[in-house]
Image (cartoon, helix red, strand yellow):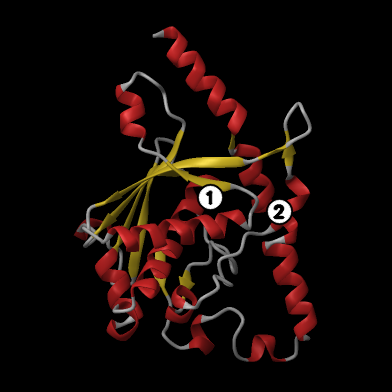
Amino acid sequence: MFRRGTSSAGRGSACAGRGCSSTPAAFLLFILMFGCIGGARAFEHRDENGDLEKRFFLVEMCDLAKMSAGTLQMIRLEVERIYERAGVEIVWSNCRQECRRGIESPLAAAVYILEHLPENLQSSERTLGFVFADGGGLPGAVIYVSRSSIEKFIGRRRSVVPCNLARALGRAIAHELAHRLLKQREHTRDGILRAKFSREALTEPLPKKFCFAIGQMEHLQSHAQSNYELRRRFALALTAQ
């Protein structure tokens, strides 16, 4: 579940105020580069020919809030760049068409952008998104995020700028998707799975607060689909038809 934090950068941000005042800037830069960018390279996968093989998750996004095509594209790009730092790729797929053709699609999650969350899912007025549990009680494949709740939280002045609303929605989706892909219900103190984010964290140009720890990167890459596996599964399904 994704909840908004305070509007104050000092209270709602993990790296604001006294907590970072005595930390050398060079050390913070090292942590940011290693934790969000450099760490991904340690888990690169190569195919049988030694070529770098991208690992990815297939995700379907259903827009029920009737957003513009341009805003939806910005939302997708925001999610992609957050996961790219973890060494995996998010591929957007129309899995319904593949299923109609008799092909089993390895869909990781289905994301629904709603105007409003259903009342029974709003544990508090701060709830911005929700991931349904599967049969085993772990985060399942269906994710809801609320456009109106996010727009209200970041404020009218920010939300009238399309890129701000797209960033906030993309980061809310990335958070709920992390629950699903990491199979983790609990929130963490820092990083992409922290329980609360400030409005600044949701709209600033760089998603600095939406980082994966090294262990989380390793988990994502070990569970992601490979290009080879996906091509093989689709080829077998088409041959059987």
Residue 120: which quarter of the image?
Answer: bottom left
The Cα–Cα distance between marks 1 and 2, rounded to whole angstroms, is 20 Å
The residue wearing badge 2 is 40
**Closer to the camera, 92 or 216?**
92
Query: Which residue was labeled with disc 1?
Result: 184
Residue 150 position (above or below residue 69): below
**Disc number lying in front (1 or 2):** 2
Could you tell me if residue 26 is visible in this image? yes
Tag 2 secondary structure = helix
Residue at image x 55%, y 63%? Answer: 192
Q: Amino acid at mark 2?
A: Ala
| Viewport quadrant of the C terminus | top left
Q: Residues within 10 Å of mark 2 (few under 14, many from 20)?
A: many
211 with respect to 178 (left or right): right
Query: Is residue 117 rendered to the left or right of residue 171?
Result: left
Residue 111 screen position, x and y as percent: 36, 49
Is residue 183 at least partly visible in the picture? no
| Camera-side residue of 111 and 103 | 103
Judged left or right of residue 2, residue 178 is right
Whether residue 164 is situated above or below residue 132 in the rendered picture: below
Point out residue 40 in the picture as x, y percentages from the top left corner: 71, 53
Residue at horizontal 50 percent and vertical 14 percent from the top = 236
User: Percent x, y for residue 79?
Assistant: 48, 57
Which tag, 1 or 2, sits closer to the chain's start?
A: 2
Tell me residue 92's x, y (percent). 43, 44
Quadrant that contains the N terminus = bottom left
Disc 1 crowd rating (10 Å Cα; few below 14, some 14-19, many 20+) is few
Left or right position of 189 against 32: left
Q: Amino acid at mark 1?
A: Gln
Q: Is residue 240 above or below residue 166?
A: above
